Image (tube, rainbow, N blue to C red):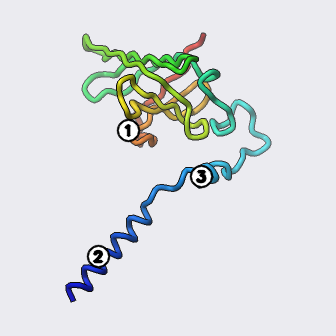
Amino acid sequence: MRLSFSLLLVTCTALLLTACAPTPKAEQEALATTEPALAPAASAATATPAQETFGVGNFAGVFNGTLPCADCPGIDTTLTLKADGSYLLHSVYQDRNSSFDEHGVWQVEQSDRSVRLQQEGKDTTSSAYQILSKDEIKMLDSEGKPIDTPLNYSLHRKPA
């Protein structure tokens, strides 16, 4: 009886782990290419990031905005994405005498749907932003997923 229960537990655990396995990259890319296209009446102004091609050279620019802060009115944020693949993130906490700078390298990922920042001296992604358009990016959570909140996590391209 005890052996049967242990065998059942091991089998269920194996099935759960198999079901939760990440989708292979080739399969993810195949799924991304099978998304429905916009209707022919849609204009270029309403094009989604999946229809635009972004890369380090043509997406570089300065993005700014005020991000939410847990214990202050907001964080004035300027993200400079340079054409050479480097970035500078300057954050100023409102109502405080506090700011910080971060720098490293950046790249466009996930079929032109996100920008990933790799802070200098760190092995993991520092932060990520969803590309909403060529002029707007929105901060993602630590797992690279959209933040489910009514608060504004967007940064907008600063005119040149």
Horizontal and vertical percent position of residue 99: 31, 14
Q: Nearer the viewer, mark 1 or mark 3?
A: 3
At x 54%, y 16%, the residue is: 82
Quarter where residue 88 is shown:
top left
Label 1 vs 3, first from the N-terminus:
3
Q: Which residue is mark 3?
A: 26
Quadrant in which the C terminus is drawn: top right
Residue holding disc 2: 9
Query: Of callouts 1 and 2, which one flags the residue occurring earlier in the amino acid sequence?
Result: 2
Q: Position of residue 106 (x, y in %)?
A: 50, 26
Q: Looking at the image, is mark 2 or mark 3 earlier in the sequence?
A: 2
Determine contact: label 2, label 3, CB under 8 Å.
no
Separation of marks 1 and 2 at Cα, in angstroms: 32 Å
Kindly state the secondary structure of the residue where label 2 is placed.
helix
Which circle marks residue 45 in the picture?
A: none
Q: Nearer the viewer, mark 1 or mark 2?
A: 2
Q: CA distance from mark 1 to mark 3?
A: 24 Å
Asked whether 30 or 98 is in front, the reply is: 30
Label count reads 3
Label 2 crowd (10 A; few <14 / some 14-19 / many >=20): few
Whether residue 10 appears in this view of the structure is: yes
| Residue 63 seen anywhere in this rendered image of the structure | no
Question: Residue 42 vs residue 109: left or right?
Answer: right
Callout 1 environment at 10 Å: few (<14), some (14 to 19), or many (20+)?
few
Frontmost residue, 95 versus 107: 107
Amino acid, disc 1:
Ser
